[in-house]
Image: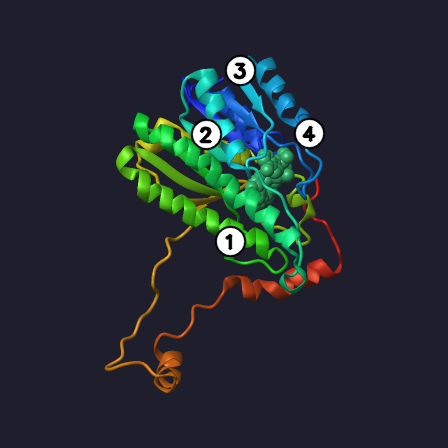
Amino acid sequence: MGNFLAGRVVAVTGAGRGIGRAVALAAAAEGAKVVVNDYGVAVDGASPTSEVAEAVVKEIEAAGGRAVAVADDVSTMAGGRRVVETAVETYGRIDGVVCVAGILRERMLFNMTEEEWDPVVATHLKGTFTVFRAASAVMREQRSGTLIGFTSGNHQGSVSQPNYSAAKGGIISLVRSAALGLHKYGVTANAVAPVARTRMSAGVPMALAEIGEPEDVAALVVYLLSDRAAGQDITGQVYTVAGPKIAVWAQPRELRSAYAEGSWTPERIAEFLPGSVGVDPMPMLSRLAAMEAAARDGARPNAR
Ligand SMILES: NC(=O)c1ccc[n+]([C@@H]2O[C@H](COP(=O)([O-])OP(=O)(O)OC[C@H]3O[C@@H](n4cnc5c(N)ncnc54)[C@H](O)[C@@H]3O)[C@@H](O)[C@H]2O)c1
């Protein structure tokens, strides 16, 4: 065991499998007491079971660590509150929350139903809000804490997961809002965009050029939860971790602007905009042809 998180209390959602499980195990191995939340559902969010969270608690205890299970659904306010209350009631405080829980319901936009949209946005975006909401109230009082949301490279856009992409973009904006709103209370907020071999990435139909293991992601999260990151005032950031690569995403900013003398009309904009303000080409669009070709042959190249 290391001591990166000695004395810390950390809650991890979606901690029963994949990346969340690796984060929970790594945090415990670095000395944190861990709340292991997992609703124990299938990739599409169906068939909950409490056994998944309990199994990870047993793993942590077997390795000499301390953990408690919460099998609630974080897409409900009560579920998010319970994750944080369990930390405070069991261990007396909450120093970090890591919102990893997620599901997929893949469909093209023009075919997507409300039943495919709502639970995906609720699990990812609202499931981050419910936990951030409860944790930030405690962290504001104690004048310290770390909020970590999980996003995806797909926040740039997605052909067949517009629900997931929209939720992941929303998580980045929520994280930045938390970073802004809680900075004066000594609380940081950051987002992680992982690429790692799990049951979720095994279903991605195209080859991921850069992919690693959940443990790579866990190492970054442990660092972000630690004093070492707090000392660097790391907040409002989005980090990709994909195997050996860590990357930071740019902050959104205006790229080019132009000003009118007098007021705009559609005619003046039509003459002016293409040559002055122009466009910022989508990197994802240029990768689309290759992705579509891979999807057509139906390969599942990221399976273990
Ligand atoms: N694996 C990747 O390459 C990859 C890429 C980009 C983003 N992500 C994101 O990383 C996170 C973890 O993904 P993973 O690959 O480990 O997936 P995973 O399916 O292995 O694990 C997700 C866990 O979340 C749990 N969960 C689902 N709904 C829940 C709810 N309402 N409340 C509590 N728990 C719930 C599931 O039971 C599951 O154990 C997700 O947010 C995912 O979108 C993963």
Give residue 30's position: percent from left, percent from top.
47, 21
Name the residue tied to disc 3: 65
Confirm or deny contact between disc 4 and disc 2 (CB under 8 A): no
Q: Earlier in the sequence, mark 1 or mark 2?
A: 1
Name which residue lies at 37% across and 42% down: 178
Give residue 254's position: percent from left, percent from top.
34, 63
Compare residues 123 and 256 and report the one nearer the observer: 123
Name the residue tied to disc 2: 222
Mark 1–mark 3 distance (CA, rounded to whole Å): 35 Å
Q: Is residue 303 above or below residue 81?
A: below
Compare residues 256 and 49 and report the one nearer the observer: 49
Which of the 4 image quarters holds residue 63?
Answer: top right
Q: Is residue 98 above or below residue 257?
A: above
Give residue 165's position: percent from left, percent from top.
55, 53
Tell me: 136 left or right of 125.
Answer: left
Question: In the structure shown, which secondary structural element does the residue marked by tag 4 occupy?
Answer: loop
Name which residue lies at 68% across and 29% down: 49
Confirm or deny contact between disc 1 and disc 2 (CB under 8 A): no
Mark 3–mark 2 distance (CA, rounded to whole Å): 15 Å
Type of residue at label 4? Thr
